[in-house]
Image (tube, helix red, strand yellow):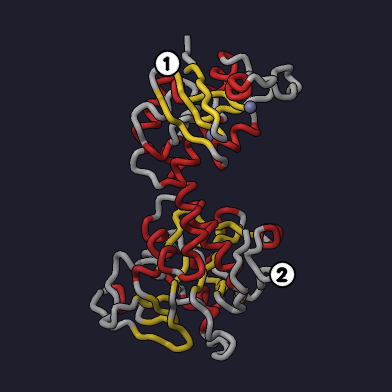
């Protein structure tokens, strides 16, 4: 997935930290400490990053910021090079799962390049008293479902700049495309994460594409497992659809026009284009490999009108591809819609088509 925006280099950072079996919201386990690749963790049996995603449990500092940590920022990155960084993704090796590399969350609009003392009042801060990265709690997002990566995946999904590998040291710069792709991936993996949704809606680079992703999610939520192949199923969809945006409604309409109920309607109509037929033209299109003529279905009343029964079979007609396009994009209007027939005006000509009924 690519954006049309010009690419901004060093827009994000992918930084490693030790694994924490308590989701970085509490102290690590003994095994976590033993499994860490970082010498200081092993030596001191202590992880600064222990509370990185405890921002919803422990208090923020007086300035509203929550402090976290990654060993990658102990030596601050070049100020000039990192001045456009708007997000820091945190990567860790899941030692209980074959050391697979998992991006488990991020700090959005972060401050870093310094050492920060935790001064907020909480007993756990006596032990975990400082860090090197801070962000507002609302901009710190933990992924229940992490983005698992390896060098093939980052290449295929453009999670890192072209020709870059996941750094052995644990630090990679990301360009704006990479950031975009990672956040969209996180959204796909965590569709019910409201905080992530809210963050994305204010993240300049992502507003537009994220809206498309949200629409898709809404669509799947409405359609669910429905195959739209029974009258009841369609009535149910119609109810769920009411609150959706126009784009989502269009998707649902297309879904039904291509679904199982549409196949019944096609059969009932004998695979004829009802408009061609009404015009006295040959009503059959080319034959498909299964022997049936190719035909499409169309909702006469646009789904977006939300009129009652708009998704029902009575609102479907069969049309050839050409007439289907004309109904959507050409010069045509419905001038009458009774329970037994539709009257269309197409290119100035009035045509009457009988309603299809399931027997
Ligand atoms: Zn036709
Ligand atoms: Zn249509």
The answer to which image quadrant residue 53 occupies is bottom left
Whether 233 is drawn above or below 133: the answer is above
Left or right of residue 344, residue 308 in this image: left
Which of the numbered marks, if any, corresponds to residue 162?
A: 2
**Image x and y of residue 265, in percent:** 54, 19
Residue 311 visible, this angle: yes
Where residue 137 appears, as percent x and y from the top left, is: 34, 70
Secondary structure of the residue carrying tag 2 is: loop
**Image quadrant where residue 158 sits:** bottom right
Most foreground residue, 242 or 126: 242
The residue at 46%/84% (across/down) is 112
Q: Which quadrant does the N terminus fall into?
A: bottom right
Q: Are marks 2 and 1 in contact (CB under 8 Å)?
A: no
Q: Which residue sits furthest front?
A: 348
Question: What residue is disc 1 on?
Answer: 340
Q: Quadrant of residue 165?
A: bottom right
| Nearest to the observer: residue 213 or residue 152 | 213
Q: Is residue 261 above or below residue 184?
A: above
Please state which of residues 323 and 51 is positioned toward the viewer in this rendering: 323
């Amino acid at each position: 997935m690519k954006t049309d925006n010009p690419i901004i280099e060093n827009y994000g950072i992918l930084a490693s930290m030790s694994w924490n079996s308590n989701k970085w919201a509490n102290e690590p386990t003994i095994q976590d400490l033993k499994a860490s690749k970082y010498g200081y963790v092993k030596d001191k049996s202590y992880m600064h990053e222990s509370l990185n995603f405890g921002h919803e449990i422990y208090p923020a500092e007086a300035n509203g910021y929550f402090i976290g940590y990654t060993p990658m920022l102990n030596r601050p990155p070049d100020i000039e090079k990192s001045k456009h960084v708007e997000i820091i993704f945190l990567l860790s090796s899941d030692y209980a799962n074959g050391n697979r590399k998992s991006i488990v969350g991020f700090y959005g609009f972060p401050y870093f390049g310094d050492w920060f003392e935790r001064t907020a009042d909480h007993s756990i801060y006596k032990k975990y008293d400082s860090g090197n990265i801070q962000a507002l709690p609302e901009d710190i997002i933990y992924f229940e479902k992490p983005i698992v990566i390896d060098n093939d995946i980052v290449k295929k999904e453009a999670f890192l700049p072209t020709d870059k590998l996941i750094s052995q040291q644990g630090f990679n710069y990301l360009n704006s495309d990479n950031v975009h792709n990672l956040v969209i991936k996180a959204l796909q993996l965590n569709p019910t994460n409201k905080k992530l949704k809210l963050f994305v809606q204010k993240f300049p680079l992502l507003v537009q594409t994220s809206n498309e992703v949200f629409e898709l999610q809404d669509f799947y939520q409405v359609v669910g497992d429905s195959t739209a192949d029974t009258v009841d199923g369609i009535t149910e969809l119609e109810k769920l659809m009411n609150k959706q945006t126009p784009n989502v409604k269009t998707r649902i309409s297309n879904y039904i026009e291509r679904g199982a109920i549409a196949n019944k309607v096609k059969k009932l109509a004998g695979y004829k284009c009802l408009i061609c037929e009404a015009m006295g033209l040959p009503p059959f299109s080319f034959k498909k490999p299964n022997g049936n003529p190719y035909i499409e279905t169309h909702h006469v009343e646009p789904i977006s009108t939300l009129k009652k029964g708009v998704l029902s079979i009575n609102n479907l007609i069969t049309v050839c591809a050409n007439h289907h396009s004309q109904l959507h994009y050409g010069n045509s209007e419905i001038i009458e819609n009774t329970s037994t027939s539709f009257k269309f005006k197409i290119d100035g000509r009035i045509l009457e088509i009988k309603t299809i009924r399931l027997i």
